Amino acid sequence: MTVVMEAKGVRRYYEVKKGMLAKAATVRAVDGVSFTLEAGRTLAIVGESGCGKSSLARVLAMLEPPSDGELLIDGLPTLAPEADRRVALRRAVQMVFQNPYGSLNPRHTVGRILEEPLEINTDLSRDQRAEAARAILARVGLRPEAYGRYPHMFSGGQRQRIAIARALMLKPRVVIADEPVSALDISIQGQILNLLMDLQEELRLAYIFVSHDLGVVHHIADEVMVMYLGRPVEHGETGLLFDRPAHPYTRALLGSRPRIQTGANKIPRKTLSGELPSPLRPPPGCAFHQRCTFATELCKRDRPELRQVEGRAVACHHAETVLGGAD
Amino acid sequence: MPALLEIRGLTVEFTTSRGILRAVDRVDMDVAEGEVLGVVGESGSGKSVSMLALMGLLGSNAKLTADRLAFAGTDLLTLTPRQRRKLVGKDVAMIFQEPTTSLNPCFTVGFQIVEALKEHMGGTRKWRRDRAVELLNLVGIPDPGARLNAFPHQLSGGMNQRVMIAMAIACQPRLLIADEPTTALDVTIQAQILELLTRLQRQHNMAMVLITHDMAVVSETAQRVQVMYAGQLVETRSADDLFSRPRHPYTAALLSSLPEHAERRARLATIPGLVPGIGDRPVGCLFSPRCAHANDRCRAERPDLYRDPEGLARCFYPLDDSGRPEGVAA
Ligand SMILES: Nc1ncnc2c1ncn2[C@@H]1O[C@H](COP(=O)(O)OP(=O)(O)OP(=O)(O)O)[C@@H](O)[C@H]1O
Ligand SMILES: Nc1ncnc2c1ncn2[C@@H]1O[C@H](COP(=O)(O)OP(=O)(O)O)[C@@H](O)[C@H]1O
Ligand code: SF4
Ligand code: SF4
Ligand SMILES: [Mg+2]
Ligand SMILES: [Mg+2]
């Protein structure tokens, strides 16, 4: 058991101005996230658009500093590290983005894109860099000719392979993937997911996998963290959360997902009413209470803290009732 | 059931700097009154272009040909795109994937609904306003009277999609074409929007063409399904038959590549290779470079759509009930 990444009460706030004269307001995009991630494991982050998944991903990738809280890599703090540790840190965590079109420089060849991280972060010679780039191309299933070509000459799936290859150049311990297959066709999604799983096994990579596709999450994640308005509301093993969700919001997310069904008696989806409230004006008490069928007076008043219930962490006053209910 | 929409041999070609590209290749489609037809296929397979062609919404570099294109018995081929838009504009409505691209950011949503009503329904100013409020209410927008004055950027993606739906059903169309209406939305909002669409469809006995790449959504919503691949229709049959006994190897491969059909953490079944681009289509069966059952004949000849007891499949060796190709030695 090697913990490679640990988040302790990580927060990320943004100042936003609505209109010219209005006073700046604070959006708590990420409002207290804690977890530990072991080598070779996948933690999925799920939740509705705007709940803070990408903001969290950027903090974990050290692209932005946390506004509060702490991020540890290999047990060591990441904030204001000594210069010699900074390089090692940057190598340890790499990111793969949703949009394989936007994330690759269109004016650089694939070879140059892959070698750039080595040029900046290592003292490998030119030949060694080229050799490493060619090796990784083969590993992610691209032909050797790809080395001299430009990103626009590739399909979406191939570009995502290039992005994954680039993320692997520095032999990271953690790869943060923000919706890595959402923009791809179904027949290509499977190829990329297989590649990610193979690489994980081979290199003992830890993944943070941000996705809104619960089918994909169920398939590849070891554990899942469900977020609502910047806060984790349930966190536990994938099988447990999918089979016996304890938070009404987890239940609602699972209930709204479409399933392949045939025959006369299709089970209708359980739809969740309403939308994610504005993060500028989060509701008092439990942030989910306006949409929750289990809500009581207590929920409107007191915010539930995360606590352990039947093997997972859940932030709900009535988690036991939710688990106990037949439906 | 009489066909409301009847399309035979629809072909759309674009003149581009790379020459003439065929985006839609002899596609047939029938939609009956009150029926929900699902259209699935990967991006670039011609789903949107075929529907835009019907609506007369393609640019001047597009050339449309068809053996037959009829709506409620009226032959649309003899009309100019402009006349077709007018005729079709009231009875056929379309909603698009990105509501923000089809709502005008400069006008309030109320103004945009009222304009649509004015063009196709007339009525007094008061009637149009009342109807706009009624429509927003119908699509589940809270406080509809006040929302009439909102601009699109002041509403969420889900709200804008509801406004689009309100506009689309404003003139009580007989056919609604929904092109990826929920792709940009969260599952929670997606479920709300699909429930709304199917409720409206049933209440008004409206026919619907639902274009999506989400197989699960189609299985829940559509009575019949058409599968498109590289501009061609490759399979069509009832949703139940298609999902339980696909006949075309592409449909079968697509279904088995879904994570829900695999053991957790197991490798997913994949379709090797890529969807052919519009300019590099193979000589024989368009699926032959990726098909597990392809033989020399497949690589040399293009299969037609062949009729079987439940539907149509464009394959020389359609799969039997156990998923094995017919007519080839094992
Ligand atoms: N740079 C920023 N400045 C101001 N607000 C921001 C900034 N980045 C994110 N936010 C806000 O923080 C919240 C969380 O945004 P984030 O992009 O993390 O959501 P998400 O969960 O990734 O959503 P999606 O599923 O749409 O990608 C949102 O309310 C967003 O508007
Ligand atoms: N205006 C255009 N000019 C040239 N090619 C086009 C044009 N519009 C669409 N295409 C091409 O036609 C094909 C089918 O597109 P489309 O119908 O949008 O696919 P989808 O099935 O994803 O909706 C694609 O290869 C697309 O690039
Ligand atoms: S705390 Fe109350 S409102 Fe919040 S999820 Fe639990 S039951 Fe619902
Ligand atoms: S015709 Fe041949 S290549 Fe094409 S789908 Fe059928 S078996 Fe596969
Ligand atoms: Mg995001
Ligand atoms: Mg389209």
Image: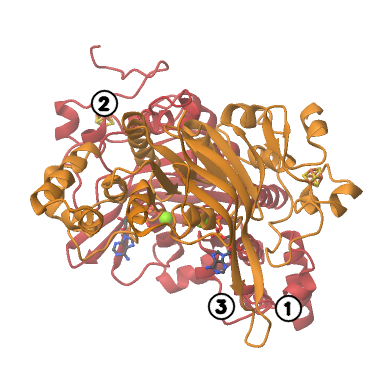
Chain colours: A orange, B red
Disc with the residue nearer the chain's start (1 vs 2) = 1
Measuring from the top left, give residue A62's x and y in whole percent. 44, 56
Question: Is the distance from the Cβ of mark 2 to the nearest ligand 4 atom less than 8 Å?
Answer: yes
The residue labelled by disc 3 is B105
| Residue B253 to residue A35: above or below | above
Q: Which amino acid does label 2 sit on?
A: Ala
Q: Which amino acid does label 3 sit on?
A: Pro
Q: Which chain carries label 2?
A: B
**Front residue (pair B55, A134):** A134
The local secondary structure at tag 3 comes to loop
Cα distance between the residues tagged 3 and 2: 48 Å
The local secondary structure at tag 1 comes to loop
Q: What residue type is labelled 1?
A: Gly
Taking the view exactly as shown, the residue that stands out farthest to the top is B330
**Front residue (pair B295, B80):** B295
Mark 2 surroundings within 10 Å by alpha-carbon count, few (fewer than 14), some (14 through 19), many (20 or more): some
Q: Do labels 1 and 2 share a chain?
A: yes
Disc with the residue nearer the chain's start (3 vs 2) = 3
Cα distance between the residues tagged 1 and 2: 59 Å
Q: Which chain carries label 1?
A: B
| Residue A61 to residue A327: above or below | below
